[in-house]
Image (cartoon, grey):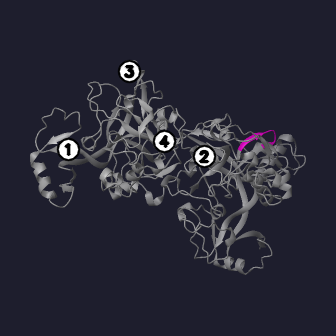
């Protein structure tokens, strides 16, 4: 066939690309390879917590161990954490690999290469940590097929492409020792690029044995471009991130993922206040075998977390993106051994031989397990709405959707009508002598809990309280889940029983809320909040949330590590000074008395000791703990009765602060009833 002109030649090359799926730098080609790919495409999508979805072109380039060849007895990774193609369950092939004559740790069999890993590569805790690869120590070897690596195209410029791995291919600590370091002197940088001992602080020599050497042939390495890596300081903490470098392989920085001008172009939702599906990634089975953790949380099941090259709050820490796509700028230790590595690189499109790998869409990672299919109606609820109104104090008001979910003691049943005139101030009461007598008779010696009809009642000393539905404000709806905040102070207890430095992760209050507290029944009671508030069916809806504990906004006080909790308190960041607070319906400034931060204790919380104002302007309103430490770590921030935030805090042993729990639930798994909206607009 004769090509008549240049336009037909271009059409012919496009057709050839579509048929073969391969772009190579054919000598004399008229059309640049980049024409066959596209920049990330950003579109609106209501399913995403960020409201956006990104679509990336993908290519195959290089190869690396990925899928494991196993026999029928293999059970090292939870099924929900596996992707299609991760396992090659083939007894015959497994037997051939076991019987093969391995001269090195790489073997070619029927034209396919395999890598074997011995027990010397197994972590000491490999069989004991949950959500980690379970090593079978009776087997001397594990076998992995070496397969093409899939990459997302983040950028295209002048015959160059910026590629980011579509999954975490490996798991390696950012640095090999617990010491001050940064990207430029880290062992991870040296390992990725195959640098010699002079390139890192530990003098570890990766010459010829780095990721670049193992993943790419010499010809492929010629297409990888040494590229400048900017390493600005951590914006939140001011920690230096080392000198700028020039590397062939690198990992992304805070600037490139969420706070720089290119983050949006690369397909990520700019900003830190979203649990961004575009930042969620899974790890290969090989990376899991090497130590990568995977999430058990329903909506993010199987996702892993990944390092960035920006330092954290100290020079011994490094930032990371967690399983649900949120940036932890405070970071984790540089020696963390179960974070995935997500390599990136710039390549020369005129030299690289790339194979088309279709597209990746960010919302495809949003999971709804078949075993957790919705079996109850999902209420029609949405995010808070802030409305400008010059007629109300502060010039605006917030309206939250509200739901009823769970039950907790709230209304006091009185033996006779109250005569102190404070029944309205101290929460709901119901004068019911007949019911009170029934409760006393039914209790006898059986304890402090009685059920009459379908209602449960709890005795506190000589007083009885009815367990009423808990009313929650809806702070956020995303990915089939809802973040809920109780609309009242439901209980009263100290943040911690001992006056000392304590962060949320070690606090007695956290343990009591989540049912893990040992002892202190004289302070918190015999049952945890979770045990009292939710049935077994309702507990099925409660999600384990990853909780970020950022430092105090004013004083810089450290607030400990991140935690994973079913029940938690909001943080300073959640209720003021951040875009997240605005999204949740709170005012950003602490110069305003935010009515959305005013909370009334229930009658039960008041009986448990919760303080309430008797001032006519704030009658019945209490104050409530946040989980952020105050000006010192033996203090904790609180919201006062006027709606102001007190960042300096109050001692952790304070006995009369209210408890306002927060939870995230998966909608549709148990009954959630829509009730009347909650608004800060004055009546």
Q: Can you see residue 665?
A: no
Q: Residues within 10 Å of mark 2 (few under 14, many from 20)?
A: many
Q: Residues within 10 Å of mark 1 (few under 14, many from 20)?
A: many
| Distance from the alpha carbon under mark 3 to that under mark 1 | 34 Å
Q: Residue at x 87, y 50 (%)?
A: 26
Q: Which mark is residue 633?
A: 4
Q: Which mark is residue 393?
A: 3
Do callouts 4 and 1 mark residues in contact (Cβ within 8 Å)? Answer: no
Residue 110 image position (x, y, % from top left): 77, 73
| Distance from the alpha carbon under mark 2 to that under mark 3 | 39 Å
SS label for mark 3:
helix
Decide which of tag 4 and tag 1 comes sooner along the chain.
1
Taken as a whole, is the magenta stretch helix, strand or loop?
strand
SS label for mark 4:
loop
| Distance from the alpha carbon under mark 3 to that under mark 4 | 34 Å
Magenta residues? 154-160
Q: Residues within 10 Å of mark 3 (few under 14, many from 20)?
A: some
């Amino acid at each position: 066939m004769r090509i008549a002109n240049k336009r037909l030649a271009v059409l012919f090359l496009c057709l050839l690309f579509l048929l073969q799926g391969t772009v190579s730098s054919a000598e004399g080609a008229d059309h640049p390879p980049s024409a066959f790919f596209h920049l990330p495409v950003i579109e609106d999508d209501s399913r995403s917590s960020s409201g956006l979805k990104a679509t990336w072109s993908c290519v195959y380039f290089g190869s690396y161990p990925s899928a494991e060849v196993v026999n029928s007895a293999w059970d090292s990774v939870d099924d929900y954490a596996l992707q299609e193609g991760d396992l090659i369950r083939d007894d015959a092939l497994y037997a051939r690999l076991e019987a093969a004559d391995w001269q090195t740790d790489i073997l070619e069999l029927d034209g396919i290469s395999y890598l074997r890993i011995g027990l010397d590569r197994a972590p000491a805790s490999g069989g004991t940590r949950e959500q980690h690869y379970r090593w079978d120590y009776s087997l001397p070897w594990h076998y992995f097929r070496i397969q093409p690596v899939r990459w997302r195209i983040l950028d295209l410029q002048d015959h160059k492409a910026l590629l980011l791995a579509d999954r975490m291919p490996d798991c390696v600590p950012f640095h090999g020792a617990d010491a001050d370091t940064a990207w430029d002197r880290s062992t991870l940088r040296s390992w990725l690029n195959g640098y010699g001992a002079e390139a890192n602080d530990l003098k570890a020599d990766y010459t010829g044995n780095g990721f670049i050497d193992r993943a790419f042939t010499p010809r492929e390495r010629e297409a990888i471009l040494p590229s400048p890596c900017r390493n600005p300081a951590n914006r939140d903490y001011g920690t230096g991130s080392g000198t700028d470098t020039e590397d062939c392989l690198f990992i992304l920085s805070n600037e490139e993922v969420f706070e720089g001008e290119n983050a949006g172009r690369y397909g990520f939702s700019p900003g830190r206040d979203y649990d961004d599906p575009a930042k969620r990634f899974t790890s290969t089975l090989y990376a899991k075998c090497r130590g990568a953790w995977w999430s058990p949380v329903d909506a993010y099941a199987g996702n892993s977390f990944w390092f960035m090259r920006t330092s954290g709050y100290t020079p011994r820490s490094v930032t990371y993106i967690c399983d649900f796509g949120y940036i932890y700028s405070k970071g984790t230790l540089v020696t963390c051994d179960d974070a995935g590595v997500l390599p990136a690189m710039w390549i020369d499109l005129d030299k690289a031989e790339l194979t088309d790998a279709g597209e990746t869409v960010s919302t495809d990672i949003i999971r709804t397990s078949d075993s957790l299919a919705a079996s109850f109606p999902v209420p029609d609820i949405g995010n808070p709405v802030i409305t400008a109104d010059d007629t109300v104090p502060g010039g605006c008001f917030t309206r939250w959707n509200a739901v009823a979910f769970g039950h907790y003691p709230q209304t006091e049943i009185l033996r006779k009508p109250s005569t102190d005139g404070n029944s309205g101030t101290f929460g709901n009461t119901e004068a019911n002598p007949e019911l009170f007598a029934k409760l006393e008779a039914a209790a006898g010696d059986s304890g402090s809990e009685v059920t009459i009809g379908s209602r449960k009642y709890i005795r506190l000393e000589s007083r009885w309280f009815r367990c009423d539905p808990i009313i929650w404000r809806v702070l956020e709806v995303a990915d089939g889940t809802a973040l809920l905040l109780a609309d009242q102070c439901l209980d009263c207890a100290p943040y911690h029983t001992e006056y000392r430095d304590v962060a949320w992760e070690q606090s007695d209050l956290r343990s009591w809320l989540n049912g893990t507290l040992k002892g202190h029944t004289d302070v918190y009671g015999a049952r945890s909040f979770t045990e009292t508030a939710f049935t077994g069916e309702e507990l099925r809806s409660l999600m384990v949330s990853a909780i970020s504990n950022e430092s105090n906004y004013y004083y810089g006080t450290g607030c400990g590590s991140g935690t994973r909790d079913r029940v938690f308190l909001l943080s300073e960041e959640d209720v003021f000074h951040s875009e997240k607070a605005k999204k949740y319906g709170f005012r950003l400034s602490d110069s305003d008395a935010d009515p959305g931060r005013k909370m009334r204790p229930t009658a039960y919380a008041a009986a448990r000791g919760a303080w309430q104002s008797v001032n006519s302007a704030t009658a019945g309103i209490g104050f409530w703990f946040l989980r952020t430490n105050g000006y010192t770590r033996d203090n904790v921030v609180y919201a006062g009765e006027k709606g102001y935030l007190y960042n300096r805090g109050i001692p952790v042993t304070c006995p009369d602060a209210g408890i306002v729990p927060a939870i995230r639930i998966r909608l549709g798994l148990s009954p959630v009833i829509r009730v009347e909206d909650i608004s800060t607009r004055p009546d």
